[in-house]
Amino acid sequence: MRKPWKVAVFGIIGIVVLIVIFAAAYINNIGLHNINLMYTLGTTDKQIVLMDGKGNYLAEDRSVELLLKERMSSEGWTYVTQEGANYFFEKGNELTFVTVQQWNHNYVIYHVKDNVVNIAD
């Protein structure tokens, strides 16, 4: 004869173990550093944060084009044109582009070619 409380305890333990496994897989897939960046975007007034020193920036997927043009303009760059996911800007004789990549359904990554400008808050 089974004891119902044992079944309930083992069921709850099984659910907790599954939750821990799924959370660990999510963190492993995204990366702890990136989760911290997502948390920063969600809990502060920052709109763009630096991901690494290679010119990658993380932002929430809201007004992607407008935010990029605004940031580049504030740094003295003039918008030229867009070709696909690349936005071209010029400043004097210098030409650069920023590639916008959809990272997941809530975030985008801006990649500034050669990291010529810092667009983070």
Image (cartoon, rainbow, N blue to C red):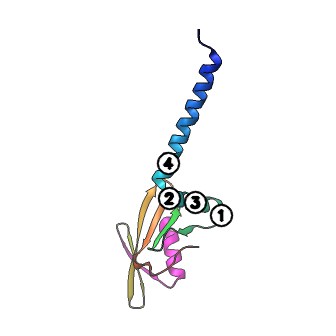
Residue located at (53% from left, 57% from top)? 32
**Residue 8 is drawn in which quadrant?**
top right
Circle 1 — which element? Answer: loop
Instruction: Give how far apart the Cα atoms at labels 1 and 2 are.
Output: 15 Å
Circle 2 — which element? Answer: strand
- Labelled disc at residue 44: 1
Residue located at (48% from left, 51% from top)? 28
Provide the residue designation for mark 3.
36
- Residue 119 placed where, x, y %? 52, 75
- Residue 85 placed where, x, y %? 37, 66
Amino acid identity at mark 1: Thr
- Residue 79 placed where, x, y %? 43, 79
Q: Is residue 104 above or below residue 51?
A: above
Quadrant in which the N terminus is drawn: top right
Amino acid identity at mark 3: Asn
Disc 1 packing (10 Å; few <14; some 14–19; many ≥20): few
Q: Earlier in the sequence, mark 4 or mark 2?
A: 4
**Residue 36 is drawn in which quadrant?**
bottom right
Disc 3 packing (10 Å; few <14; some 14–19; many ≥20): few
Q: Earlier in the sequence, mark 3 or mark 2?
A: 3
Circle 3 — which element? Answer: helix
Instruction: Give how far apart the Cα atoms at labels 3 and 2 are.
Output: 13 Å
Q: Earlier in the sequence, mark 3 or mark 4?
A: 4
Provide the residue designation for mark 2.
107
